[in-house]
Amino acid sequence: MLSNLLAVVICIIVMSGGNAFAFGSSKSKSEPIKAWAKIDKHSVTIGDKIHYTLVARSSRGIEVEFPQFVDNLGGLAVRDFGFSVKNWLFFKVYKRWYVLNTYTSGDYTIPAAVIKYRRAGGKRWDKVNVKELKVKVKSVLKSAQGIPEIRDIYPPFYCSNKKKIFIIAVLVFLL
């Protein structure tokens, strides 16, 4: 019984230490906030939407301020954005999300973001950095097999007067 409890406690300690490492780069482990960034796709084709999310999990009584990205983010155009806050029993989860896309192929880097936080009513802002993320945008034409370039549409089809008369005559005969 005691060995099972000890194994559970060790597992929790290892998992929380792993989360602190994976989630962020706060100055020390005693910081009241953990922050990270994520994207839904690391490789897309031209015109596809990429959902980029900044997440901060803090203890209650902490104010969080996210960076403002309005026009573009690492060369990708910002098409939409939003913000949400969820209150849990002992902590809050802040999310700022962006919908990004581009019409130019290549490798893009979404820069590292700096999230500021402070105790409620405090004056000094502390910072947490989240890591940069890489996105590869591929061309649609390269994935088309055997088609070296875009082909033009067919010209309009015109019926001659003789064909029109023949078609009308056949329809009248059938009626």
Image (tube, grey):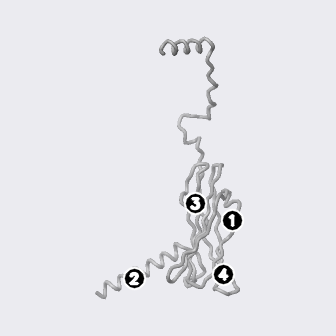
Q: To which residue does mark 2 refer?
A: 10
Q: Earlier in the sequence, mark 2 or mark 4?
A: 2
For the residue labelled by badge 4, is the local secondary structure a helix, a strand or a loop? strand
Q: To which residue does mark 4 refer?
A: 126
| Residue lying furthest front | 175
Residue 140 at what x, y percent from top left?
A: 58, 43
Q: How many marks?
A: 4
**What's the CA distance linking mark 1 and mark 2?**
41 Å
Q: Are marks 2 and 3 in contact (CB under 8 Å)?
A: no
For the residue labelled by badge 3, is the local secondary structure a helix, a strand or a loop? strand
Q: Give the label, 1 or 2, closer to the camera.
A: 1
For the residue labelled by badge 1, is the local secondary structure a helix, a strand or a loop? loop
Residue 153 at what x, y percent from top left?
A: 62, 30
Q: To which residue does mark 1 refer?
A: 69
Q: Earlier in the sequence, mark 1 or mark 3?
A: 3
Q: Give the label, 3 or 4, closer to the camera.
A: 3
Q: Which mark is residue 51?
A: 3
The amino acid marked with disc number 4 is Asp
In the figure, residue 134 lies in which quadrant?
bottom right
